[in-house]
Amino acid sequence: MLPRLKSLNVLASGTDLLVSLDPKVRVRLADPDGSVLALLRLLQDGSRTPDELAAQVGSDVRPVLDHLDRLGWLEDASARSPFDAHDTERYFSNLAFFDAFTTLSLPRDEPQERLRASHVLVLGAGGLGSAVLMNLAGLGVGALTVVDQDLVELRNFARQFTYTEASLGQPKADRVADWLRAFDPSLRVASERRRVESTEDVAELIRATKPDLVVSAIDEPDEVDRWVNAACVAAGVPFVRGGLAYTQGLYWSVDPGRSACRECLERHRERLAGGVDAEIVDVPRVLRQDRVNRAIGPVAGVLGGLVAMEALRYLTGLGEPVAAGRYQLLDFAGDCSTSSDAWPADPDCPVCATALVPA
Ligand SMILES: [Zn+2]
């Protein structure tokens, strides 16, 4: 092992050192004789084993190294990367981000390897779906399956950047697959032009493609969330859903057998409904409401990024999912402030009862 110090901001304040990796966290270390700074300097190039470090500073450094590792300041410079020079360069920024989570025993290549080994099924390649796909491709998710029924239309271009006017009238599923293959020829991309019309449709797609995660970026018909939920929970496949309600962006996810599911929410609507919502539970709609999709490019981009971020948590295990059984909301008409609203798991939920909990 060759412990190497990550990039830290180290300041001297009298006989103390003020050290931060994350600017939000500052650690004060007493260093009256300068030995701590000397050790940090020796750790900077990651060329010395713990024994060599001990020989240089004249004392056992292992307890100090353990402490620095718990602070998240160290990585192992001797960890062998599974990636060749091309992939290391391609994923340069991902690896730098994962550096924030790594320790001496968790190399930063590991999350990237998990992403490369992952397969995500994306339902819908419209505004949100195409933004999620672009992000998943950038993260290096190894295999992507896209399902969409629509053709490229001129009105799509305000928010769907994987298409061009040359693709007008052509299936989005195929054109977005072209975009993905051109973006990264090493990705395994499959596309299917079809409509999702039942729980069984989603279950069949899951059986056929065996994804690690599903992203649902379709919002019609109204029942689609319940179909995706029922199929994913029964198959033990987590899913992330994003969408826009008027000008409020939202995303949520379901971790089968671990978080509340969508059906739990349906079963609790009455109990959860407060204020203006309490009046409308179980009251029929009497005037047709036309569906208006108000998503513009920045909205699709931000939501697509947040959905991909939640996917990243599921696929790599770096941090717990933040939207499992919980609405995450963004106010796009205002200052983009965020709020969060969890719903409870229903112990009698018939869908949760089918949950296949992944090992
Ligand atoms: Zn449930």
Image (tube, rainbow, N blue to C red):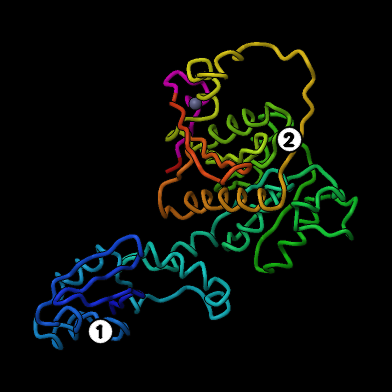
Image spot of residue 325 (x, y percent): 48, 34
The location of residue 181, given as percent across then percent down, is: 72, 64
Magenta part, dominant SS: loop
> Which element carries disc 1, helix, strand or loop?
helix
Relative height, residue 252 to residue 227 (above, below): below
**Amino acid at the residue labelled 1:** Arg
Of the image marks 2 and 1, the number of the one nearer the N terminus:
1
Residue 232 % position (x, y): 57, 36
Residue that badge 1 annotates: 41
| Numbered tag placed on residue 196 in the rendering | 2
Residue under the image location 36 percent in, 75 percent down: 7
Report the residue at 64% width, 39% height from top: 243
Q: Nearer the viewer, residue 131 or 285?
A: 285
Query: Quadrant of the image for the C terminus?
Result: top left
For image coordinates 67% across by 68% down, the residue present is 184
Considering the image in quadrants, where does the N terminus appear? Answer: bottom left
Q: Is residue 356 magenta?
A: yes
Q: Is residue 240 above or below residue 257?
A: below
* Type of amino acid at the residue the image marks with label 2: Val
Residue positioned 63% across, 31% down in the render: 225
Q: How many marks?
A: 2
Tell me the crowding category of disc 1: few under 14, some 14 to 19, or many 20 or more residues within 10 angstroms, Cα based.
few
Quarter-of-image position of residue 357: top left
Q: Position of residue 6 (x, y in %)?
A: 34, 74
Mark number displayed over residue 182: none
Residue 195 sits in which quadrant? Answer: top right
Closer to the camera in the image, 114 or 307: 307
Magenta-colored span: 346-357
Q: Secondary structure at mark 2?
A: loop
Q: CA distance from mark 2 to mark 1?
A: 58 Å
